[in-house]
Amino acid sequence: MRLTSNIIRIAMFTVMATFIISCGDSPKTKIETAERLLNAHPDSAYMLLREVDYNNLDSDSLKAKYILTKAITNLRVGRSLITDTLLTDAAAYYLSKGDTTNWVIASQLLSGYDFIKGDPETAMDRLERMLPLIKNRELLWDTHMNLTEISLNGQMYPEAYTYSDWLLNHTNLPDQILKFGAVKGASKYMQGDFDRAAAIFDSIIATGITDRATPGIVSQFYCDYAEILDGAGRPAEAAEIVGRLNEEDGQVNDVEKVSRMVSLAQFYANSGNIKKAETMLDSINHDATRSVIEAYLSIGMLKAAIQFKETGRFPSEMMRKITKDVHRSYTISQYDRQTALESVIELNEDNYDLKLQKQRLWLSLSIITLIVLIGGGAVYMALNRRKQRLADAEERAETLAKMIEDVQKPDNQKSRPSDSDMLKAALLRQLGIFKTFAGTPTQQSRDALKRISNVGNNGESVESLVDWPDFYSMIDSLYDGFHSRLTERWPGTFNDKEQQIIVLLKAGFSTKEISVLTEQSSATIYVRKTSIRKKLQTPGDGDFIAQLDTLFSSDEAR
């Protein structure tokens, strides 16, 4: 039994280990964890989601959550939405479930995907159709923000003006007023309405809101204002604004500083101060601006324009150098892009290998668990059968001993011997037991009883020890031909074991005694009794011996 207990413990441990590996590493757990890490640790969320196989997700809700979480995570880590082609499914699912919040978020991301594909019209249309259905103010605000950004970047300037105006009218925060005011003015500027664009900036400045806004936002607002003024034919004012900003802002980074110097040189040139523009351009380290391609090109074009104005000759050498540098920059960017793609492919291959390893581990654990369970079950069943056989043998030995004890009682302790007593004595003599145990049974004789009672378990048949035809003859002589009537009335109905049980019950033998004489367990005796009742159509637990006696009496009466 100790062996069985150890096997069961091993099986339970294996099953628990498999369960922990599978559940602790389940896709649902990874998605929910990534969702919690989304804002604070987007990189960790991104790595978790890379381990999830969308095709293995077993519910629409989990698939939708995965799609949405993955898309947001990609934005957080600076990746493109170009791979999030399943956003349509997520948006449709949340809309069908009445989950407005997640539907709006999924639709906003989907519109960004449309824009990246080069379809700003579809992106705008998707968001505009959502507006009447959004009741949440925060979601409504976010949607107008998306509409403003897409329309401005998509060069749909009338729409950008409309949506930035809506945002401007629904906020009282100084930073937001400056941002959306600048977008509104820029929208007019890009439509060619320079004066109206400048007027929008002037009206915002007149409110004094710049005194309450964040310095960095204020600086960017005035830089945009300077560009508007230059376009409106007021380059001197633009130069004055940027010059003042350069004097006041001591914490500007190198890229922003170069950008301002380029703008300032442009404003000087447009105001006719060519010498100052040249001085400004010469003070810029031209080669250091190659990493900022816009500034690099602007410097080159400004220098070319000034030289053309002064000499009437276009500086072809300079333009060839700039063209070569731009081509080199493009080549490097393409190389970086190709390298990034190869890295993604390698990561995907590594991820695939990890999945295969996990699947193999899971399969191995499952096979081991199955083998342990089957082996443990087989051992348990074998030991249980052996235990049951020993228990049956012990019970039969006790029954035999009781039968011998009853037969050996002195005559003065017995009433008139019954037919059952005589049959028992006859059977014991037939088995060769009565003579062996004529005296008081010893431990050695009890061991012999056990061996006799276990006949059949080792391949030896009890029927070879009991002469059943002779016993049936005794039954017929004692009980008016009971066995013969049974076989005549129901020929071929009862098998040998069932006939033995019926005649032994008729003779008054107990179930345990019948078990010994027929080499069957007590449980098997009960089962065969049920079979006999069905054949005789005896109701429930009825006494079929009494039923047989009644039937045989009826036959005699006829």
Image: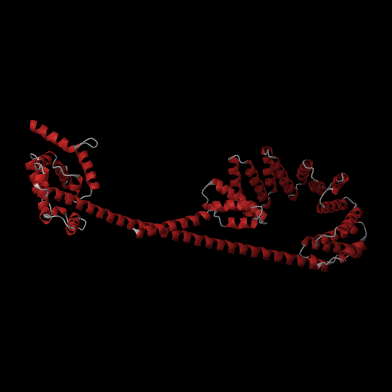
The answer to which of 497 and 234 lies nearer the viewer is: 497
Name the residue located 67 percent from the left edge and 39 percent from the top edge: 134
Horizontally, is 59 left or right of 310 in the view? left
Residue 522 visible in the current orientation: yes
x and y percentages locating residue 477 in the rendered image:
6, 42
Which residue is the extreme one toward the left?
477
Name the residue nearer the viewer: 20 or 213: 20
Can residue 468 be seen? no
Q: Is residue 244 left or right of residue 438?
A: right
The residue lying furthest to the top in this view is 558
Position of 69 relative to 130 (above/below): below
Q: How many marks?
A: 0
Counting from the top left corner in percent of width and height, residue 101 is at: 64, 43
Q: Residue at x 47, y 55 (%)?
A: 19
Position in image of residue 394 (x %, y %):
23, 53
Look at the picture and state if 240 lies above or below 209.
below
- Image quarter where the C terminus lies is top left
Image quarter of the N terminus: bottom left
Most foreground residue, 315 or 20: 20
Q: Measuring from the top left, give residue 263's x and y in whole percent.
A: 85, 58
